Amino acid sequence: MAKKGQKVLSLKPVGDLATFLREVECVVESWSPTRDFYPWFRGQGCGDDRWPLVPKLYRPEFQKLDEDDFRKEFQLRAWPYLLGTAWEPNSKWEWYFLMQHHGLPTRLLDWTESALVALYFALNDQEKKANPAVWAFNPWELNRKLARKGDEILNPREKKIQRYLPEPYSRQALPKHPIAIQPPLKSNRIAAQQGTFTLHGSSFKALDHYRLLKPHCVKIEILRSKVPLMKEQLLVAGIAETTVFPELTGLCRELLDFYKYEHERPSR
């Protein structure tokens, strides 16, 4: 229940950028009226239960795969392709983050500190028959109440989280519950996307299915019929493909999307 004077999220799908930002402000005001912290955000192309908050490795189509195979082969074969990543990974954690941002299934779930970046991903990954959505999440409550790691966002150097990423093929048991972690911003993509992660343990349970986390996990749905409009509004606000993918591939996609839209755009 909201406290007296607090704004309340409408829970209705939104259809323009201004309304979306008002909903984000309602979440921030409700969770942190004094602005002691800000939520993390995640954009998803489907706002219903077909896309629970679980990492790719724990989705049904990948559950039988062994991520240690990916970790070993990626580290062996990725070296010729590192140009443009801004750094050479020098720890198991940095290799793991790089794997995630280039598409291999891991136990990491992507989040961002930017609501607009999350909205960009929601609009561009949209399924045609479903409303996209942006999730807002309080990572401090995850680490405090579920992972029991204290009132902090953890970083890979800390000893208390090393059990979450054992050496490949060690078969060391993972902790059960997920944690929230802050990666070093060494990758161009991670830095541009203001990336953060939740790292899941042995449990396949989605974040939004934990009873303790339900008050700290809010979904803002977007009307699918308004996706073209909101894409245009995001572009005006300065959020484009090269904003989140600062590389030549991102530039080419941005140019293609822009001129394709200009060609197909109805006259007003």
Image (tube, helix red, strand yellow):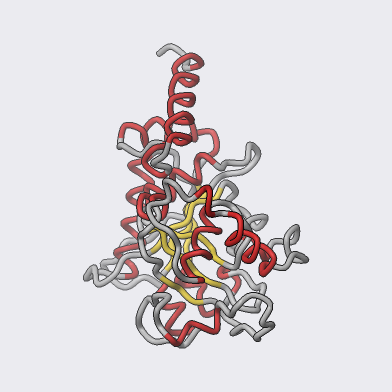
View extreme (right): residue: 64
Residue at image position (45%, 60%) is 111
* Residue 142 horizontal/vertical position (percent): 46, 77
* Residue 144 horizontal/vertical position (percent): 42, 84
Question: Does 187 appear above or below 224?
Answer: below
User: Along the line of sight, which residue is nearer the eye, 52 or 130?
Assistant: 52
* Residue 78 horizontal/vertical position (percent): 56, 54
View extreme (top): residue: 267
Q: Is residue 111 left or right of residue 32?
A: right
Residue at image position (36%, 70%) is 2
Residue 184 occupies which quadrant of the picture? bottom left
* Residue 181 horizontal/vertical position (percent): 43, 72
Q: Quadrant of the N terminus?
A: bottom left
User: Along the line of sight, which residue is nearer the eye, 80 or 182?
Assistant: 80
Residue at image position (67%, 55%) is 50
Question: Does 256 appear above or below 63?
Answer: above
> How many numbered marks have been drawn onto this rendered protein structure?
0
Q: Quadrant of the C terminus?
A: top left
Question: Does 98 appear above or below 153?
Answer: above
Residue at image position (29%, 66%) is 6
